[in-house]
Image (cartoon, rainbow, N blue to C red):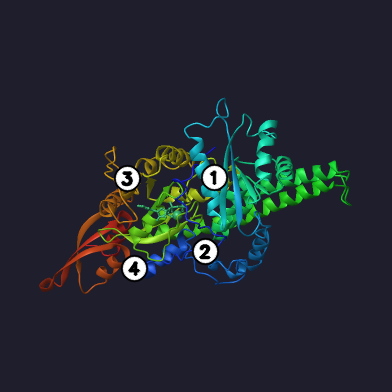
Amino acid sequence: MWALRAAVRGGTWLSRAVRGCRPPRAALLPPPPHPERAVAALRGGLGCSDGREGRGRSPRADGRRSLADAEEEPEDAEEDEDEEELLRTDPLLPAGAQRVCLVHPEVKWGRGKPQGTRAEWQVAEARALVCTLDGWSVVDTMVVPTKTPDKKLIFGRGTLEQLTERIRGSPEITAVFLNVERLATPTKRDLEAAWHVPLFDRFTVVLHIFRCNARTKEARLQVALAELPLLRSHLKSNIAHLGGRGRSSCYTMGSGESFLQVQQRLLRDREAKIQKALERLRRKRRLLGQQRRRREFPVVSVVGYTNCGKTTLIKALTGDAAIQPRDQLFATLDITAHAGRLPSALTVLYVDTIGFLSQLPHSLVESFSATLQDVAHSDLIVHVRDMSHPETELQKASVLSALRGLGLPHTLLESMVEVHNKVDLVPGYTPAEPDVLAVSALLGLGLDELMARVEDAILRATGRRTLTLRVRLAGPQLSWLHQEATVQAVDVIPEAGTADVKVIISDSAYGRFRKLFPG
Ligand SMILES: Nc1nc2c(ncn2[C@@H]2O[C@H](COP(=O)(O)OP(=O)(O)OP(=O)(O)O)[C@@H](O)[C@H]2O)c(=O)[nH]1
Ligand SMILES: [Mg+2]
């Protein structure tokens, strides 16, 4: 299980930003060197989102639409409505501002003691999660010893009494965030009854942030799928609770099923429908991806831990002024592609991906790892690391182990370029490893070296080469080369009516050139 160790430094990393599902950043494409081709490829390829709002039919409640949504076929209208129905859900957290008491159960020894981290970092991560929510703040923090954070009784009797006294005695506290992955519903109910305020666990808060940040239909369906275990556990304990209060949990409907069985069947139906809708979207994406590959734009996937600076780096490499990175966890949930130009004038597509996390609830991990499968179809992976983060080594280990879990081709893993980002925050930083590039995506430092490295790796990975071809100026060769390859220089020989054209060309395009223009 990945461990969520968020990018938090002294609570200052996260601006108050997810901010209650506010409208997304605009992620418009830059003017690419061959705009019509690159945009067609972007649209076709990778569920590219342009973040434009309010277009197309059946908009979301918050008015967000993405290019991926807007491009759906008209015949999908009925499926579309079904999908919108699947996406209608109750709020996970109460609306409005909350003053939160953060309670961190600390296991000091034994099997449950977390490895490779410290309570202060876990508290900082929890604080970051809470402060990512619009209007929420932490007014009190308590680190409380426990031996059994995963059990129904998280705290011993004495500790619970002390906690209850402090929470009930502090009228400024309006909610409690208990820093455990999942709270059993009976535990939540008992503690809420004792503390007289609503109580939340990490799963609920992370899920809420995911809901706010998911833009394309695929990401929103993934979140809906990840929510099902929560609905299941609520269902069971709610029915048990009703039974305990003297009402039958085995109310037999006309079908002969008990109430619990009917509800469970409805949830199974819902799960099957979401899976089907996701498969439909993915099939479409795969098809469009094949079209993109035929157009032969090399693809560079940018991966890394959440908040390490992936989106900022893509913005710096593409000059795409419309991309707006945000200082918050899980800002990017949808895979988007952005056209950029390498020093040789070769156009590549940079693919922005969801940040990796650890200790993320399992169902979220599963539903989002499907999105990351797209990384397997790229020509190069760039792994961005935040070198100013105290847990940067743990983050690297967590990203690499997740990438290995995706079953990516060996060559792709071996050719991965590691980028050390945010070096402006680490005065005098020089990487210990020879193949690593140190950059500041924010200040634009080290980007030329990075682009040169990317170009090198892309040429190798895609079998492209630099050739000088002699063409007749009267014929269509030159415009063909402009269409199908990257023209770097044209040296006209007027007396011969020819030109020497320096191009970067793929093996397959060169084969086609020779076939079309023999001799
Ligand atoms: N000082 C400094 N800050 C940076 C640098 N790169 C990114 N940041 C900041 O780090 C925060 C997160 O940047 P993003 O680009 O959104 O990070 P991300 O990896 O895309 O994050 P997720 O999409 O949430 O996974 C933003 O506030 C950026 O301004 C850098 O080189 N130096
Ligand atoms: Mg991002």
Mark 3 is surrounded, within 10 Å at the Cα level, by few (under 14), some (14 to 19) or many (20 or more) other residues, namely few
**247 displayed left or right of 154:** right
User: Can you identify the residue that label 3 sits on?
Assistant: 426
Label 4 sits on what residue type?
Answer: His
Mark 2 is surrounded, within 10 Å at the Cα level, by few (under 14), some (14 to 19) or many (20 or more) other residues, namely many
Q: Closer to the camera, 375 or 100?
A: 100
Instruction: Give whichever of discs 1 and 4 has the lower sequence position.
Output: 4
Label 1 sits on what residue type?
Answer: Ala
User: Can you identify the residue that label 1 sits on?
Assistant: 126
Name, please, the residue furthest toward the top: 110
Q: Closer to the camera, 21 or 301?
A: 21
Q: CA distance from mark 4 to mark 3?
A: 39 Å
Label 2 sits on what residue type?
Answer: Ala
User: Can you identify the residue that label 2 sits on?
Assistant: 68
User: Can you identify the residue that label 4 sits on?
Assistant: 34
Q: How far from the left and from the top, in percent, is residue 448?
A: 26, 54
Instruction: Give whichever of discs 4 and 3 has the lower sequence position.
Output: 4
